[in-house]
Image: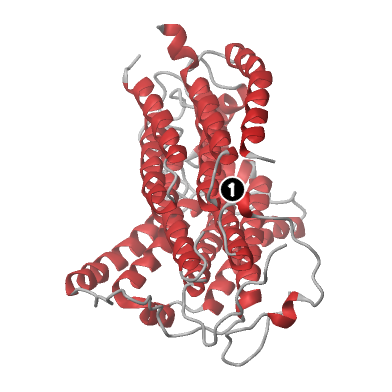
Amino acid sequence: MTPRIRVALLALAGVVLLPGAAAVITGLPPFGATIAQYGERINAITPEARHVANMVSAINFDLRGLDTLGEEFMLLAAITGTVVLLRGRRGEGNTERALRRPGRAVIPRSEAVVLVCRIAGPLTALFGLYVVVHATVTPGGGFQGGVILASGTLIIYLGEGYAGWRDAVRSHWLDGLEGGGALLFTLCGLAPMLTGAAFMQNILPLGTFRDLMSGGLMLVENLGVALAVAGGFTQLFLEFMEETREADELDEPGEESA
Amino acid sequence: MSAILPLLFLLTALSGTAVVLVRDPTRQVFVIAVNGLVLTILFDALQAPDVALSELAVGSAAVPLLYLVALMAVRNQLPGKES
Amino acid sequence: MSVVSNILPYAVAVWLFGAGLYGIATSRNLIHLVGCLGVCQSATYVLLLGLGYRWGSIAPIFYDHPPGTPAVDPVMQALVLTDIVVGATLTALLLVLTIQVYKRSGSLDPEKLRPMRARQGSDRAEGSDRGHDGKRTVL
């Protein structure tokens, strides 16, 4: 399919779909007028019913916890797919040698960078933990805090170099974190059923409103999500970084395509 | 009614178009990071701080890094065959 | 003017989606294509959060404000929140696929790619592994 035909088909699709899009846009409620009834009800009853202040966390971990379980496993599946695709060709070993491009000078790390990374790394990790733990009282939660924690491990790479980073960040721990987080979330769903309650029903004591330890089962699920997201993203970074390392023996030149 | 929100929406449209129009992948990475930042500000103005935190961490730390490392891996894989 | 501000978020979402589609259709580089897919994703975020907004409302966090203050829709924010994180992971998976495509065919240009044909031997017999212990991961 030549580019011209492709763009022509796209233009045709646009011409056909634009009246539909225009009809939908004018049919929607005007921007900022009202919100949906479901959202109104949640805002009205959840602070009383679950003793939490963050409605978004309550929806993610309690009211629509099943959807988050699905998202969690989507994350796990995508990361597993990445790992399988990359390691399947490369094997499971890791190399210590950095990549050298011919003709480019290798610049040693400046001390200012190392110092700043050593200061910023623990601070970022602490901030990530703060965001994770305050899921039910301030904006935050497992998803956000997990990504912040994963980007904190990157600061180790910036400061210490590849060998130092691989020493600090082990692949097996990351597998355990990722899988363990997903397992924890699933157990939070199944464990209430052992006591006769519904799947993922909030059976732990709910705590007091605006307190750090409020929300009951939400906190455990939040922890599971944080572990899975942090482990998963760091695993992604690790696999991608491994991809750029020098091979022990050269790969075969790519099989010729058809 | 404020004037900030329509301005931010227009800025979002602009930065999204810029991501599409910059064709060189190494330059597009920076435009993607800027797009993430603009989206973060928009989400904050729409009273969604959780979403803004998430978009900031992902769109300016995680995703540009993945692009950069993918570009590194592609560039160094088969040095004889440049596309 | 108020008509424009009534529909502006939805129009911006449609525009972003269309621009992303145009980028995907006319891309000459697979990594650029994945970036345009990200623009399509951001169009859905803008649409969802635009639907959930109400003038003069606070964020749905009742820590500083008493419960009962008008707040924006938290359901939309919950949808977009998980969507952003999972979308980043899927971007990583797509980038891995482009790396594999580059390894096999030597080109990142969608125009130069051809459908794969069945080969005589199996691929795994010819590939090499870098593991120190010589183990292979079997797919």
Helix, strand or loop at label 1? It is helix
**Dot 1 surroundings within 10 Å: few (below 14), some, or many (20 or more)?**
many
Residue C29 vs A47, above or below: the answer is below
Q: Is residue A243 left or right of residue C128?
A: left
Picture coordinates of residue C67 (x, y %)?
45, 30
* Image coords of residue A37 (percent x, y): 61, 22
Q: Which chain is indicated by disc 1?
A: A
Which quarter of the rendering shows the N terminus of chain A? top right
Q: Is residue C60 above or below residue C95?
A: above
Q: Which residue is mark 1?
A: A61
Residue at 29 percent across and 72 percent down: it is A159
Q: Name the residue at 56% across, 34% down.
A: C22
Q: Is residue A53 visible?
A: no
Compared with residue A162, is residue C57 higher up or lower down, i.e. above or below?
A: above
Amino acid type, residue under disc 1 in the picture: Phe
Where residue B80 sits: x, y (%)? Answer: 50, 71
- Residue at 25%, 75% in the rendered image: A107
**Residue C118 visible to an observer of this rendering:** yes
